[in-house]
Image: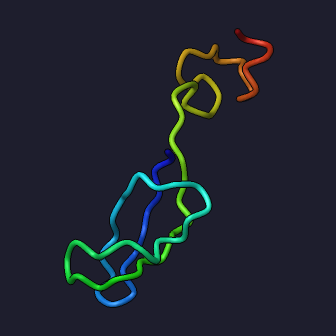
Amino acid sequence: MPIYEFRCPCCGVLTTELYKMGENGELLTCPNCGHAGLAKQISGFASLGVSGGPGGGNCSPRCSGNCAGCH
């Protein structure tokens, strides 16, 4: 199951939950105020790998960020 972030519409607390894809959070309860029905948030993601920019991470100084030419 993927991890989603949900925000309570009552108190604004953000919580992270393992939740089935396609579910919207209406069955979740806020851990702070107990309000039923949390709103699914759009969130970024993390990825291991090159830390962008020329010369970042394990890239050579001539890397353009694509890494096809330096790895």
Residue at 71% over, 29% down: 65
Residue at 51% over, 47% down: 2
The front one of 5 and 52 is: 5
Position of residue 53 measured from the top left corner of the image (x, y, whole percent):
63, 33
Q: Residue furthest right?
A: 69
Q: Is residue 29 above or below residue 68?
A: below
The front one of 42 and 37 is: 37
Is 7 situated left or right of 29 in this image? right
Is 69 situated left or right of 10 in this image? right
Position of residue 21 measured from the top left corner of the image (x, y, whole percent):
58, 55
Position of residue 59 measured from the top left corner of the image (x, y, whole percent):
62, 16
Q: Residue furthest bottom?
A: 10
The front one of 39 and 67 is: 39
Q: Residue furthest front?
A: 27
Which corner quadrant of the image does residue 67 belong to?
Answer: top right
Residue at 54% over, 71% down: 24
Q: Is residue 10 above or below residue 62?
A: below
Q: Is residue 1 above or below residue 54?
A: below
Which quadrant, please, contains the C terminus?
Answer: top right
Residue at 79% over, 13% down: 69
Which corner quadrant of the image does residue 16 belong to?
Answer: bottom left
- How many marks the image carries: the answer is 0
What colouring method underlies this structural image? Answer: rainbow
Q: Residue furthest top?
A: 71
Is 29 situated left or right of 55 in this image? left
